[in-house]
Image (cartoon, rainbow, N blue to C red):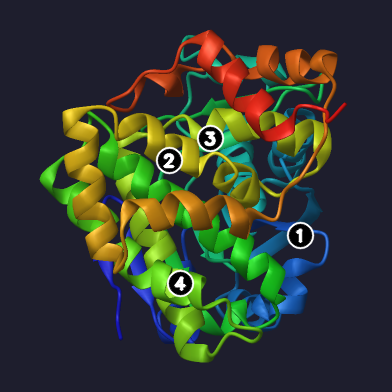
Amino acid sequence: MKFDFAFPTRLISGERCLAENRALLAQGRHAFVVTGRTSARRAGVLDDLLPLLEEQGITYTLFSEITENPPILTCHAGGQAAYAAGADFVIGIGGGSPLDAAKAIAAYAANPGIAPTDIYDPAKRVNSSLPLLAIPTTAGTGSEANAYSVLTLADGRQKKTFTAPDSWPRVSFLDPRYLASMPAPMMVSCALDAFAHAIESYLSPKSTVFSEQLALWAAGQIWPILSAEPAVYTAEQREALLYAATAAGMAISITGTGFPHPLGYSLTLLDGIPHGRACAVFDGDYITFNARTEVGAARLAVFAAAAGTDPDTLARELPRLSGVSFNFSEEEITERVELIAGAKNYTNSPYVLSREEIYAIYRNHFAEIK
């Protein structure tokens, strides 16, 4: 199977697609390579990439400081390091965190005088980001196919999305071999993230014919694998999930995400729950509330059919697959809800939650049993 496309990122797919398309790596003379601390080497990407850069006379700096939920201060420091190294393009390798961080680093490197939060101000971020290449090693966020960079602010308690027209990767290389080192629990979390992107995009009022087809195709690829709960993922399953996650990432580049995303941010930042699982906790609520609207009910029926199931099954199984269980006090619930109550995503679905309903959802899932 092949999944080549250009939108506006050029997608290059298939085993050893880096080596077969090595000329596309030549985006400049010095690459700033952004990775997590171990994932890029463990996945085998650096063993493939670095000799190809050297072969073409491209020098590089390796920046392997990216952690989960990339901190804005780490990205700002990375941008300063890229500028100091004389980098003229950036290569992001990894899951959503390194790829999101690479987008921010490319912007900071091109605007070395700005403060960390100035990245959100186009009047201060005056220079276009450095060119960016992306190499995903997970099948979840779809960051390789959109311009979003979700950063954790300096207080460590809030996320804020940076996006700009020049934040799209120029080229993304999709090699399913790089997913082989992912353990099954991580595959599940990433697949849940991609599935959340697909359903939230499909129900979005901003959806288009193109985004809808991407979302439906992704659902049909992901759910049969995810619902089978394999103990070990085959090469064919990893390939299908990689391309489906990219398709879902393309879909949200058009529509944005819905309310499971902000509802899950508090669980990720305060409680350490991986992003995909944190979203899946609330997918049942997303389905139940949107089914109360005529548009939502109709769209859910089509989406579930594309996945090979029905809305009730999705509403029941997605939270179960998340594996998340907490008992929070009322004070802890208030802390988590207030962190995410003002997010814009709540309006991006047929049913718009009220603050009272957000509280009710959190209490329903997490209220302490007295």
Q: Which residue is mark 3?
A: 261
Relative image position of residue 132 (x, y in whole percent): 50, 51
| Element at label 3 | helix
Q: Return the disc, 3 or 4, that comes first in the chain's sequence.
A: 4
Find out whether the residues at labels 3 and 4 contact each other: C-beta distance under 8 Å. no
Asked whether the residues under the numbered discs 1 and 4 touch, taking CB atoms below 8 Å apart as contact, a structural biologist would say no
The disc at residue 241 is 4
Figure check: 297 above or below 99: above
Q: At x 38% / y 40%, what residue is drawn?
A: 287
CA separation, marks 1 and 3? Answer: 31 Å
Count numbered badges in the picture: 4
Whether residues under marks 1 and 3 lie with C-beta atoms below 8 angstroms apart, the answer is: no
- Of discs 1 and 4, which sits in the foreground? 4
Q: Which residue is mark 2?
A: 147
Q: Quadrant of residue 37?
A: bottom right
Q: From this view, report whether residue 59 is shown above or below residue 181.
A: above
* Classed neighbour count for the residue bearing mark 1: other residues with Cα under 10 Å, few (<14), some (14–19), many (≥20): some
